Image (spheres, rainbow, N blue to C red):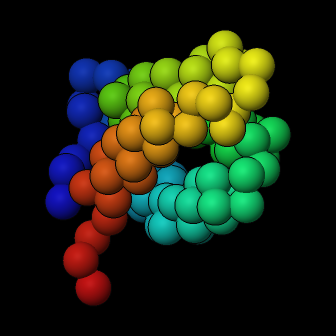
Amino acid sequence: MNLPDPNAFSLDINDPADAELIEYFLAELPDRIDSIEAAFSNDDYDALSRVAHQLKGAAPGFGFPTIGTEAGKLEQHIRSISDPAEGIDGLRSQVESLISLCSSYIKPV
C-alpha cells in the first residue's frame, strides 16, 4: 500500500484528527473505484467525468496528488472527445490507470 505524500498537503499524518481524515478518504476509494467501473461499463460518461472531477479536487488535499492528476487527465480526455465510443481505447487505458493507482493505496484485507 502506498502512503500519502507528506509534502503535498497541509494535513499532518501524525496528528490523530488529520490521520482520521486521511483514513476516511482511503476508506472511500473502493466505492469510488466501483463508481468509475460502473460508469465506464454503462457508457455513462457524464457520471465518469463527475467521479473523475471529484477525485481531481479532493485527492490532492488529502495528500494524494498523483490520484488528482490522473483523475484530471481522465476528466479532460472525456471532455475532449465528441464521441466517447470513438475514443474508447484511450478512455479505457486512462480508466484502468486511475483504478490501478487508486487500488495501490487500499490496504489489503
Q: Position of residue 33 (x, y in %)?
A: 52, 60
Say whether residue 82 is left or right of residue 94.
right
Say whether residue 45 is left or right of residue 28.
right
Observer able to see residue 101 = yes
> Farthest residue in the front direction?
86
- The structure residue drawn at horizontal position 40% and vertical position 39%, both measured from the top left corner, is 93
- The structure residue drawn at horizontal position 34% and vertical position 29%, both measured from the top left corner, is 66
In depth, the one of 100 and 81 nearer the eye is 81
Q: Position of residue 4 (x, y in %)?
A: 28, 41
Observer able to see residue 98 = no
- The structure residue drawn at horizontal position 68% and vertical position 19%, both measured from the top left corner, is 81
- The structure residue drawn at horizontal position 78% and vertical position 50%, both measured from the top left corner, is 44
Q: Position of residue 103 (x, y in %)?
A: 33, 59
> Farthest residue in the bottom direction?
109
> Farthest residue in the top direction?
80
Q: Position of residue 7 (x, y in %)?
A: 25, 22
The N terminus - image quarter: bottom left
| Residue 93 vertical position relative to residue 21 in the rendered view, above or below | above
In depth, the one of 43 and 62 nearer the eye is 43
Q: Quadrant of residue 57?
A: top right
Q: Quadrant of residue 64?
A: top left
